[in-house]
Amino acid sequence: MKQVQNSKMKYTESQAYLAGGVASSLRSAMKPTPLFAAGGSGPRIRDVDGNEFIDYLLGYGPLILGHAHETTASRVYEAMQRGITFGLQHEGEIALARRLTEILPCADKVALSGSGTEAVMLALRLARAHTGKRKVVRFHGHYHGWSDTIFTSFPSSDMRRSDAAAGAVEDKVSVPGTGGQSERALEEVILLPWNDAAVLEAALREHKDDIAAVISEPVMCNSGCVLPKPGYLERMQELTQELGIVMILDEVITGFRLGLSGAHGRFGLKPDLITIGKALGGGIAISAVAGRQEIMALIENGTVSHLGTLNGNGVATAAALATIAELSQEEGAAFARMETNASKLVEGIRSLLAKHAIAGLINHIGPVFHMMFTQEPKVDDFASFMKRDAAKYTEFSGYMLEEGVLVRSNGLWYISAAHGAQEIEETLAAVDQALARL
Ligand code: PLP
């Protein structure tokens, strides 16, 4: 049993001053207590009790290069010495925007913001302004940030609010995901099951005169890392083009994780808009909307307001440029390394599930995967994802922590470019022990 006394004490102390004791609601779910970090280096993180863990939480995704990456940290430090933020334009913004338009196939222009939530807000606003329509199609099990007009609930077991709030799969009506959210904020949202082209086509044709946008994660990373069925996103692209609807791919997770050009580049898609965040800044707050000139022009001509005091600040642009530069080295060798290591890990865990005769499966793409305990032969939509044994996985994640491996309690694993053969080997030994205890 790991000692987490100091974390427990700090949590109590924190609760006296910080609402809920954590800075983002999701973090309070960690058992036996929310851990307090002392620092991190590469693929490893240390807590205030002196425990060290191999880290697959990776700050909920952004740490694509691992903790305290040296080059990124020194670029950020240099930027801070020049001045943290200016409220004026600066070279870093141009350099980053130019680089993003070079590497993202859908990007004629980009707009910079601070978080994934803000990028989604801007993308939806652009879509409404572009089409003159109001409704937005979103999907069960996807997450697009916590703004009132799109937050229906968080579908993971590591959120205190229950999965039930995600609604029955047949529901087309969104349920507010939090107290204090007006039901009316979701009046414009049409909620559909994902990965069913026929359902999508029927809804889009029926409501085409009202629908401004379809927003979708390209891979359902927030609920089971479910891959799109062959042709599904292509059909979404055809239908939205035909019906005058803006297609937004929310690449806040997949951007800079499934390759430099994101999921849309990997899958050969050309959505109208994408949102990126998380890995873009390697851990510093920055996000972006990228897309088609005709739509981005609405910002240029003043139709759409895009605001934010710290948008494009020097520290954030330096972090993003350094992260992209690192990921671009040796023709993307970092991605190849992450994919190889993730595949080894996934194959290893699958073998261990078989060894322990535990029913489970892993959905996997590149350096992200979702491990589930389930009797289902496959998880390829939100309905099958909801049949997993979430409580059993939470128990497993607790055992992993005791074995020195930090994994998110909902089953989603991220791997960084800093993870190597040593970490994979240690992790598989930990999985072996943890599965034996289940
Ligand atoms: N979109 C997706 C797909 C996400 O996974 C997230 C966060 O997890 C967001 C948007 C919101 O991003 P942020 O937490 O930076 O506001």
Image: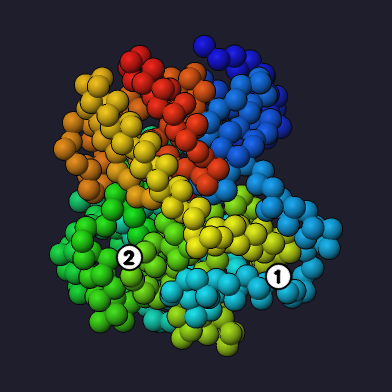
The yes-or-no answer for disc 1 within 8 Å of ligand 1 is no
Q: Quick check: 186 left or right of 70?
A: left
Q: Which residue is drawn at 77% across and 60% down?
A: 79
At label 2, the amino acid type is: Phe
Instruction: Give the residue displayed 73% in from the left and 64% down from the top.
Output: 314
Is residue 422 shown left or right of residue 97? left
Residue 254 placement: quadrant? bottom left
From the image, tell me which residue sits under label 1.
92
- In front: 374, or 300? 374
Q: Which of the numbered marks, if any, corresponds to residue 224?
A: none
Q: In the rendering, at what x and y percent does residue 50 appear? A: 66, 21
The residues tagged by marks 2 and 1 sit, at their Cα atoms, a distance apart of 29 Å
Asked which secondary structure carries label 1, the reply is helix
Q: Is residue 355 above or below residue 144?
A: above
Q: At which x and y percent is residue 59? A: 56, 42
Density class for disc 1 (Cα within 10 Å; few <14, some 14-19, many ≥20) is many
Of 305 and 287, nearer the camera is 287
What residue lies at 34% left-to-right and 55% top-to-bottom? Answer: 219
For the C terminus, the image quarter is top left
Answer with the quarter of the image where residue 138 lies.
Answer: bottom left
Instruction: Give me the disc on residue 267.
Output: 2
412 shown above or below 398: below
Residue displayed at 46% across by 43% down: 414
Assign a secondary structure to mark 2.
helix
Res. 398 in view: no
What is the x, y in percent for residue 129?
46, 80
Count neighbours of disc 2 (C-alpha within 10 A) and say few if under 14, some if 14 to 19, many if 20 or more: some
Q: Which of 233 and 181 is in front in this view?
A: 233
Outermost top residue: 1
Residue type (three-letter) at the residue carrying disc 1: Gly
Residue 69 vertical placement versus 239 (above, below): above
For the question of whether residue 93 can be seen, the reply is: yes
